[in-house]
Image (cartoon, grey):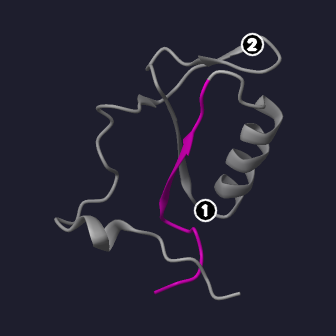
Amino acid sequence: MKNTLEGRSLGILIADGSDGTIVSALAKAANDAGAQVKIVAPKVGGTKLADGSTLKADGQLAGTPRSCSTPSRSSCRLKAPPC
C-alpha cells in the first residue's frame, strides 16, 4: 500500500463554528497531494463557519455514499503511516 493520498478520497467533516482557514488549508494540502476532497456537513446546504460565512457541503453526514468501491468497510480505512 502506498503511503500517499494520491488517488484517494478524503472527507473533511465540518460543523457550525468550523474554522474556514483551517478547512481550506487542509483541503488544499490534500488536493496538492493528489486526493479528491469532499466537504461533509450535518446538512447538504452547508454550515456556518466561525467567521460568519457559509461553506457549502458536497454531502451531508447522514446519506453521503462512501467513495470506496470495495464491498468491505474495513478495506476502505486509511492506514496511518508509522511514526
Asked which secondary structure carries label 1, the reply is loop
Above or below, 34 relative to 78:
above
Front residue of 4 and 43: 43
Q: Which residue is at the far top?
A: 52
The verdict on residue 11 being magenta is yes
Q: Element under label 2? A: loop
* Point 67% across, 64% down: residue: 33
Give the crowd class for mark 1: few <14, some 14-19, many >=20 residues within 10 Å: some
Relative horizontal placement of residue 80, taking residue 77 as reference (left or right): right
The boundaries of the magenta stretch are: 1-15
Q: Is residue 77 left or right of residue 35?
A: left
Quadrant where the image shows the C terminus: bottom right
Q: Which residue is located at x 79 percent, y 45 percent?
A: 25
What residue sits right under mark 1 in the picture? Answer: 34
Looking at the picture, how far across and down is residue 41, in whole percent? 50, 28
The image shows residue 11 at horizontal and vertical percentages of 51, 47
Image coordinates of residue 64 in percent, x first then y, are: 33, 36
The answer for how far apart the CA atoms under marks 2 and 1 are is 27 Å
Residue plotted at (72% across, 20% down): 49
Between 6 and 64, the one nearer to me in the picture:
64
Q: Amino acid at mark 1?
A: Gly
Q: Is residue 26 magenta?
A: no
Disc on the earlier residue, 2 or 1 = 1
Q: Which mark is residue 53?
A: 2
Identify which amino acid the numbered label 2 is placed on. Answer: Ser
The picture places residue 39, in percent across and down from the top left corner, at: 54, 36
Q: Main secondary structure of the magenta part?
A: loop
